[in-house]
Image (cartoon, rainbow, N blue to C red):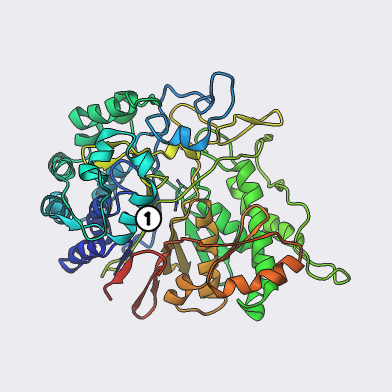
């Protein structure tokens, strides 16, 4: 079964599985097509995190294909000459925000470890669509029309998304010969065709000459890029182990903290219509985000209390903060501060203030051998840096770093450093029970990814929703104090009760893209109705 954000991509993956390919093979085909039909969200110019369950060995592995900062970048990279942090979009659009992409190497590494199909064949569907054309989807057309000014700032980008000066419309048949040629090179020569030679030279030139906002990416940054295998981060939640991507992603640690805190409450008895359930989840989430802001970053650069942050005794202590005083009733926490997890370094960080905004895509795949793949893939902002080269967009992942270097005199863990990977919220997850996978899940949504994934797991485990209900259910999120309630759903009806508990609230559209597979006697897929994805297979 394949669940991903566009039917053409899902179809390509399902065909690979039908032909006997593994989940890793199918993922390569899915990603190659997504880069064409959902170019605003992910692609060759971006990065990704992958969680793999190997049915043969029973081992879970995570691969970090996150972008890296140029070796010439300094902590002041996103500040002006006076040390003032740039405005977000002034940093995003252009070359400065572009990190060395990780996705091409990740595809190759996943295929090398777990694939059995012929590498070159996995690109044929995407090449065919790029050469013969695909119909622009309504979502792509809508996002192009909403981003006209930025997308037309650079001529190559404008020419592709605004052919003849007019925005692509839904149903327009689009061809992309440059993308087909890039894929042919990678199909023939592997990812080295991307990281060295003429494609790499074009990427570097585009970044370094971007008018108004050039970047520092170099041929060396590309040539030295590598995917890193990291230990999965797993947190026990009720009868399950919830496993995912550790640093430089904050995904698994923050999802794990939320679940590890609410484990000390009886959510099943409260049910999803109870404001009290959302107080508990919301305040658990605020506590977890406070720790995320202070402690989480690329652990290759900054010491991190990774074990301490998910230690059961620490989370039990944090859960005590949620206990209500019966005399006062159920109240929102007045004061949320980071905790003091146990760690073996004496270190105090300032809290981070980086911003993350929409794009990104999640792919869930289970193959006939029972291998399971959960991968979240991104170019960060919708249309990334807006730089378009060789048929694909370049990421703006470096704006996931903190623009400020210090807070109240303390250094910020997620500040820019040469070669470092920006902190992510991506949370590709595999939920295990008794050593076997039972749920594969993840979502786009910037730092809201964490709440989307944690809630969908609660929906499924505590509230017995099937996987489609679990991804469709209304969202209630809290990261930094305000309750975000999903517009046009039953969540909005909770507003009065939550305000009565002392929360600020905001009713708004909450654009998740949860893609999940539940593994039982058979497979059940769940595709988020808020985007264009589907589930296919059995
Ligand atoms: O890595 C991250 O957390 C972000 N760059 C992901 C961006 C994202 O999910 C935008 N989503 N709609």
Residue 384 visible from this viewpoint? no
Examine the rendered structure and indicate whether residue 54 appears above or below residue 529: above
436 with respect to 181 (left or right): right
- x and y, in percent, of residue 6 in the image: 29, 62
Examine the rendered structure and indicate whether residue 478 appears above or below residue 344: below
The one nearer the camera, 155 or 287, is 155
Residue at figure coordinates x 33%, y 33% from the top left: 225
- x and y, in percent, of residue 441 in the image: 43, 64
- Identity of the residue furthest to the front in this view: 165
192 with respect to 341 (left or right): left
122 with respect to 536 (left or right): left
User: Can you identify the residue that label 1 sits on?
Assistant: 361
Residue at figure coordinates x 62%, y 51% from the top left: 289
The one nearer the camera, 113 or 202, is 202
Secondary structure type for disc 1:
strand
517 with respect to 305 (left or right): left
Could you classify mark 1 by the number of other residues whose Cα lies within 10 Å: few (under 14), some (14-19), or many (20 or more)?
many
The one nearer the camera, 494 or 263, is 494
- x and y, in percent, of residue 453 in the image: 50, 62
Residue at figure coordinates x 27%, y 67% from the top left: 367
Examine the rendered structure and indicate whether residue 520 appears above or below residue 89: below
């Amino acid at each position: 079964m394949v669940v991903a954000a566009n039917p053409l991509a899902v179809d390509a993956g399902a065909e690979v599985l039908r032909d006997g390919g593994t989940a890793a093979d199918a993922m390569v085909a899915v990603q190659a097509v997504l880069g064409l039909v959902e170019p605003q969200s992910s692609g060759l110019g971006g990065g990704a995190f992958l969680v793999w369950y190997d049915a043969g060995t029973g081992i879970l592995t995570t691969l970090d294909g996150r972008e890296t900062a140029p070796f010439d970048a300094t902590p002041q990279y996103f500040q002006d000459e006076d040390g003032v942090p740039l405005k977000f979009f002034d940093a995003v659009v252009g070359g400065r925000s572009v990190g060395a992409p990780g996705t091409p190497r990740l595809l190759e590494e996943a295929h090398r470890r777990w694939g059995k199909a012929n590498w070159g064949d996995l690109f044929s569907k995407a090449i065919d669509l790029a050469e013969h054309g695909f119909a622009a989807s309504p979502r792509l057309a809508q996002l192009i029309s909403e981003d006209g000014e930025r997308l037309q700032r650079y001529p190559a980008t404008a020419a592709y998304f605004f052919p003849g000066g007019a925005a692509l419309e839904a149903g327009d048949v689009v061809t992309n010969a440059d993308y087909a040629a890039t894929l042919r090179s990678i199909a023939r020569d592997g990812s080295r065709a991307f990281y060295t030679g003429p494609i790499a030279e074009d990427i570097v030139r585009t970044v370094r000459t971007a008018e108004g906002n050039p970047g520092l990416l170099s041929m060396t940054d590309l040539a030295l890029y590598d995917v890193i295998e990291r230990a999965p981060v797993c947190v026990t939640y009720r009868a399950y182990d919830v496993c995912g991507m550790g640093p430089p992603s904050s995904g698994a640690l923050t999802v794990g903290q939320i679940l590890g805190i609410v484990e000390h409450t009886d959510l099943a008895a409260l049910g999803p219509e109870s404001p009290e359930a959302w107080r508990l989840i919301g305040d658990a989430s605020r506590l977890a985000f406070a720790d995320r802001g202070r402690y989480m970053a690329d652990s290759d650069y900054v010491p991190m209390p990774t074990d301490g942050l998910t230690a059961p005794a620490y989370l039990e202590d944090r859960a005590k903060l949620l206990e209500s005083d019966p005399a006062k009733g159920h109240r929102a926490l007045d004061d949320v501060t980071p905790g003091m997890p146990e760690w073996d370094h004496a270190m105090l960080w300032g809290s981070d203030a980086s911003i993350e905004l929409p794009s990104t895509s999640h792919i869930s795949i289970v193959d006939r051998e029972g291998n399971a793949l959960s991968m979240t893939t991104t170019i960060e902002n919708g249309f990334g840096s807006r730089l378009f080269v060789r048929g694909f967009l370049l990421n703006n992942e470096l704006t996931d770093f903190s623009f400020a270097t210090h807070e109240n005199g303390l250094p910020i863990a997620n500040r820019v450093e040469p070669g470092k990977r920006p902190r992510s919220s991506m949370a590709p997850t595999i939920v295990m029970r008794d050593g076997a996978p039972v749920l594969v899940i993840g979502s786009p949504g910037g730092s809201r990814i964490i709440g989307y994934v944690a809630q969908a797991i609660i929906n499924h485990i505590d509230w017995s929703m099937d996987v489609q209900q679990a991804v469709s259910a209304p969202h209630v999120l809290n990261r930094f104090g305000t309750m975000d309630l999903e517009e046009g759903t039953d969540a909005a009806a909770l507003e009065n009760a939550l305000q009565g508990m002392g929360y600020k609230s905001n009713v708004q559209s909450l654009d998740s893209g949860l893609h999940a597979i539940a593994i039982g006697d058979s497979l059940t897929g769940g595709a988020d109705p808020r985007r264009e994805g589907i589930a296919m297979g059995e």
